[in-house]
Image (cartoon, helix red, strand yellow):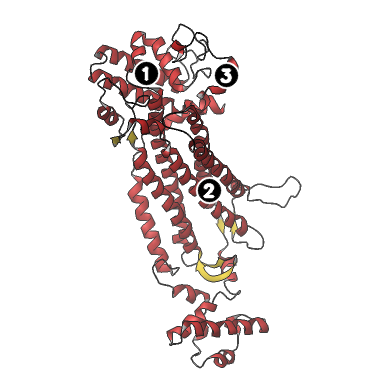
Amino acid sequence: MQNHGTITSDNHAALWHGRFKEGPDAAAVAFETSIFDDMRMAMVDIEGSIAHAKMLSKTGLISAMEENSIVEGLLSIKKDLLNGKDAAGNPFKVDTSAEDIHSFIEATLTDRVGEPGKKVHTGRSRNDQIALDERMYLKHQIKMLKKELLLLIKVLSGLAAEYKDSLIPGFTHMQHAQPVTLGHHMCAWAWMFYRDFERLSDAYKRIDVSPIGSCALAGSGLPLDRKYEADLLDFACVSANSLDSVSDRDYYLETSSDLSLVQMHLSRACEEIVLWSTTEFGFIELSEKWSTGSSIMPQKKNPDFAEIIRGKTGRVYGDMVALFTMMKGIPLSYDRDMQEDKYSFFDAYDTVISSVRIFTQMVKTAKWNTKRMNELCYGGFLNATDIADYLVRKGMPFRTAHGVSARLVRAAIEADCKLEDLPFEEYKKESELFEEDIFDAILPQKCVEIRKTIGGPAPEWVQKQVDILNDFIQKNTDEDIDSEENDWDLIFENYYRK
């Protein structure tokens, strides 16, 4: 097979070779090829070409016999790519000397079916073909990431239900603030990923628009049926402007922003895991499967996976910034700069979905030291606000009550004791409203149980959050992901990573 970047008379010449007398230098071909990035879209490119052939047949631009020949040829390529060998048992894979995956598939199709293969590109450009492939691939990948986020939310929801009564110090400014529960904290993590799921769902609506039929930028003078082709490919609608259709990469920019938020949420949770796994905190013990040791210090059990996830956040941000920077100065419509979109987006996506999967298993297999968490709720004056609230319930203005509580905290500091150990006389000295029941009111468990406002840490409200999350999981678990589409990435795994 000849180099696809050279100008030859066979089917493997560059798709644009007719204008040129000679081909680009070999180094130029290597520089401009995108095959290593876009080969993972081989399956969607084939699916898109099958739909295009059916549309061309429906509109009379090709015959039914030519349609059948094209479809059979494309299906044979798909089968051989997935099997890694052709019908004769010979090795078969993407030719990485090709300019891009679209050129490779079209050239291979023409090799197999002859003249009908040369008609598959009728009424389309690589500009709208690329946009179509990217949108189709992205639709599938968003479904896959949403599935992983649901699994993570399910794990966190389960932990929340299990530990809805287990006390843990709440922090602001990394200082002890008020007692909450581990279940409440797990719900807080879950709600971050809930929002990520919703953002991806919302982005999906804008991705689910077919650009095919926009051609290079100005549509076509041929009788194309864009709506029919979009329906075949399960798009919600067709794009409204051909110029915008081929120059738009908002779907990558928006989704990369959503990916950055997912990774940021993972990073924040990992930061807490790193802190909580220290001897000083001792809240969590990670499984040995998700920890590493030291090459010199035998006692070490390091939270490396949490740290790596945290570290990869900068990488995802960088990919997002690269995409935005790439697009900021591009005039309408398509420019070759946009070829760089796949490298940055695929890298961001791969990083995020792998991080979600690792984080889910890391949290699922961890052990939680609820005894240690509970101990730290008795100290650090986490119940100081509850002293003020106690007085407010008896009619004292909050600002006055805040001052009373602050002076009691100072008295406890000077006496080197906890608020609950401060003599009752000290309370009476500050206000006659105090009664003996103040000591029961400021027990950490009571401080949590009384916080029954919507979304609060009281166990019954944590359970209500769990119920809402579980309903959300159940509602979205049935979203269909075609099992065959899971094979799409086999092309990438087989030929790129190796």
- Contact check, label 1 and label 2, Cβ < 8 Å: no
In the rendered image, the vertical position of residue 77 relative to residue 296, given as above or below? above
Q: Nearer the viewer, mark 2 or mark 3?
A: 3
C-alpha span from label 1 to label 3: 29 Å
C-alpha span from label 2 to label 3: 42 Å
Describe the element under mark 3 as helix, strand or loop.
helix
The label on residue 28 is 3
The residue located at (76%, 47%) in the rendering is: 296
The residue located at (55%, 54%) in the rendering is: 268
Q: Nearer the viewer, mark 1 or mark 2?
A: 1
Q: What residue type is disc 1 on?
A: Leu
Q: Where is residue 146 drawn, in percent x and y?
A: 41, 44
Q: Nearer the viewer, mark 1 or mark 3?
A: 3
Q: Earlier in the sequence, mark 2 or mark 3?
A: 3
Q: Give the residue number, with chain letter if any, for mark 1.
A: 74
* Residue 492 seen anywhere in this rendered image of the structure: yes
Describe the element under mark 2 as helix, strand or loop.
helix
* Residue 12 seen anywhere in this rendered image of the structure: no
The label on residue 359 is 2
Label 3 CA crowd tier, 10 Å (few <14, some 14–19, many 20+) = few
Q: Where is residue 147 drawn, in percent x and y?
A: 41, 44
Q: What residue type is disc 3 on?
A: Ala
Q: What residue type is disc 2 on?
A: Phe
The residue lying toward the viewer, choosing from 247 and 99, is 247
